[in-house]
Amino acid sequence: MMKNVLNVLILSGITSVSCYAQGNTAKTGTDSYKIQPVVMQSRWAKEVSPANALKEYPRPQLVRKNWQNLNGLWEYAIKDSSTAFPTSYQGTILVPFPLESALSGVKKSLMPDQQLWYKKNIQKPTLAPGERLLLHFGAVDWQATIFLNGKEVGQHTGGYQHFTFDITDFLKPGANELLVKVYDPTDDGPNPHGKQVLNPADIYYTPSSGIWQTVWTEKVPSSYISSIKATPDIDKGILHVNVNAEGSDAIAVEVTAKANGKVISTQKQSLSKNNKTATADLSLSIPGPHLWSPEDPFLYDISVRLVKGTGTVDQVESYAGMRKITIQKDEKGVDRIFLNNKYTYNLGTLDQGFWPDGLYTAPTDEALAFDIKAIKAMGFNTIRKHIKVEPERWYYHADKTGVLVWQDFVNPPHHMPGGAKAAFEKEAQETMEQLHNHPSIVTWVLFNERWGAYDQQRLTEWVKKQDPSRIVNGHTGELLYVNEQLRAPSDNPWVSSDMTDVHSYPDPMNAPAQPGKARVLGEFGGIGVSVPNHEWNDLQGWGYIQITPAELKGKYEIMTKRLKKLETEGLSASIYTQPFDVEGEENGILTYDREIIKIPANEIREINSMLIEQAKGYTPDSKFVIARNMDLNDNDNRYNEFLSQYEQGKHDSAFLRRLTLMALRKQDQPNTTKIGNTFISTLTQPFSRDNLTFIRHITRTSNDKGFQMFLNDQEKINAVLGPSSAQSVVKQIINNEEIAPYIGEKHPNPDWDAIQQRVTKKYGTTGEEYVIGRRMLYYFDIAKDWKKFGEYYMHYYKTALKHSDYNINTLSWFIFEKVNDPKILNFAVDVSKYNIEKFDPTPEAWDTYANLLYKTGKHNEAIEWERKALQEKKGSEDEKVYAEALDKMQKGLPTWPQQ
């Protein structure tokens, strides 16, 4: 099976097989590299070096032998965006590991106003007459501009898609200077960025800027195969193959399919030419097709030749799987997911694809394959690849190992700045083209939990038209339930989708039944379990609920029994969150470093066999080791033992830190305060970032030493942790102790004047401002006293505009709708303008500003802003509302509700 392709792939991983060599930049000797310090490493990190950085052939679906890997040490520089070309470099970086990763050897951040530059000298290889040299990039996040010998070769935008440039005409004899300029705003631009954010926390993680997949060159003839698209039809026993070629020398294309080394089908067809490109569509007969499935991931070897007369112009090796994915009715008439015309429950897990040492980039190819093998070894047959597109070799391993893949598109930014829609649709299109040939991918997932979602019906239908060979989940988790409570309703959440989908945390539930759609549980679980000494940080990891290690197996078994019941009621798929911890998110079955498994593999496999028989049957290679089992005794069960040691005088800082966190998890506030205060007293540098982050986490009452630090040293703390960080801690405690006990159902008419006087006396201007904001919110949300709401809106934003605790646009909209006082309305105009300039340059904020301007008599300016908002909303569900507002403004009619 796949013998020819696999041999090429194995050989291509050895640099010496390549037919031409490259020189390194003079300053990039391997002795200059070392991994940067990191909290934890995976077992593969020690294998990484400049000499062997991801040397495997990067493109398994289009294999040639004549290639050169450019991974290794490059020079790098971080410059401001005005720099034309760097005149100096800051050191070396190990490509293809992201700038922020420890494995890059750099581990620095890239800000939105900066650019990252790479430099490497490459040798011009010997080229036969007519031969071309292609430069390939697996992926660069986000916008890459390529220069060779000072001349711009081209630019590519998109952080997850491969791209290629023909650099032949830019080469000179000998050494050639290759430069790559990268712009990556992470979550501060229009770019799809997934879980990457500049300020990681909870379910968002460290960015991966710059080159994060293999860079390589390849010799090709003057006419060469540029792409192959293979689409199986198992019912007719046909593999449809589309071949695209560059150049004009070839006359025809020949495609051959082999099974276990034996030729089973060959077809030859003339090329249809258009200038320098050519194409051919062939239909290979695959008699009695050996179907691909998780139980039997059989792959055919495919050879493609460009021919002219009796000669071969170009040849590539590929592979294909014969499989079919559809929604069909079972014997009871229930719509379900069918694989190869057979109902197949998709038992999946939500895989994020992050690494503690490499971030977006796995340390080695073995590590890349490990995640897939580990997930299957735990008894799952499905992976939902969560808002990340992996390197091609990940999907190659998925094809070989045999897992079903639900592939998320990488969502637009939540705040949808200008250009976000175009960027999303461009990258979605390229993703579908790039991954089309992988039989493991059975489902495209368009949107996730409303993150940047828009035009859902149009885009769902567009995806189905682009790729009718797969099913489409138009919006996973638009209906999100937490503790059985729906976060927000939706009018038509599954329009044009092939499935109805809900997210339910932590416990599973079913999606509603709709004709022609399978019912799936797109996410559930999220059970947080911390493992000491295997944490990104030792603060309480994020999870929808926190339980002890000893409770996890029982909880997972109960949820799986619930899934089995739901399956009998029509559920076709479930996605558990998640296989691996990721940074501060500790709801994985394995720890982030892949060292500890929280439920033994054989036990979770046995539990999963309740839903799929294959769970029992899959056995990984005998040499494959998942992880060590978790020690159920080295956890919070030792709390009383540790308390006794504390009382007996054990006060070393590491012990105190762990015990403070234990007390916090045990909800033992008196001991949290007592031990935490002792810990702070031992610190020699309490204002370091790491110590302040920890102190912020354990500070819960005004009796904590941390509270006094955050109250009295705000400027010093904010300089380390960021603007308003100290104030946010103080405000939360003020609320818990001084406000929350005096409002609510037991106090329907709170004495706000007394609260404000008491808090101001204790905590000064910080406390007073916070109470004023809470009063404003009370009059807005509870009392519906619009006069006082307007009054306290003015009081609050006179001092808090630069650091508002609340959504300025929402509050300003209600000022427009509910308040008629000219003084307050004009003040709200200024507030809304500041909000647009500093925080919220969105159509929604423009609309609020326009309506406030209109109500205050500034009609021409209002019309200009409303027209701008409408233009941005063209084609969306809100277009009609904005158009009606603009029409009223142009006619001089009120746009606010009339009493």
Image (tube, rainbow, N blue to C red):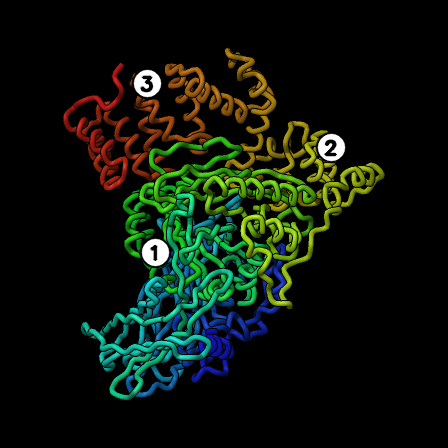
In this view, which residue lies farthest toward the left?
891
Secondary-structure class at tag 3: loop
Return the disc, 3 or 1, that comes first in the chain's sequence: 1
Disc 2 secondary structure class: helix
Q: Nearer the viewer, residue 169 or 605?
A: 605
Q: Which mark is drawn over residue 671? A: 2
Q: Looking at the picture, how far across and down is residue 326, in whole percent?
A: 37, 53
Q: Of circles 1 and 2, which is in front?
A: 1
In terms of sequence position, does the residue under pointer 2 or pointer 3 come before the other? 2
- Residue hosting label 3: 819
Residue furthest front in the image: 331
Badge 1: residue crowd in 10 Å (few <14, some 14–19, many ≥20) = many
Amino acid type of the residue tagged 2 in the rendering: Asn
Q: Amino acid at mark 3?
A: Val
Please rate how many residues cluster around mark 2, counting C-alpha atoms within 10 Å: few if below 14, some from 14 to 19, many from 20.
some
Is 856 on the left-hand or right-hand side of 506?
left
Residue drawn where x is 58% and y is 61% of the image: 618
- What residue do we see at 63% from left, 50% from top? 535
Q: Are marks 1 and 2 in contact (CB under 8 Å)?
A: no
Query: Can residue 171 be seen here?
Result: no
x, y (%) of residue 443?
40, 53
Instruction: Give how far apart the Cα atoms at labels 3 and 1 are.
Output: 44 Å
Distance from label 1 to label 2 (Cα)? 52 Å
Identify the mark nearer the N-term, 1 or 2.
1
User: Which label number is shown at residue 427?
Assistant: 1
Q: Is residue 137 above or below residue 537?
A: below
In x, y percent, where is residue 34? 59, 67
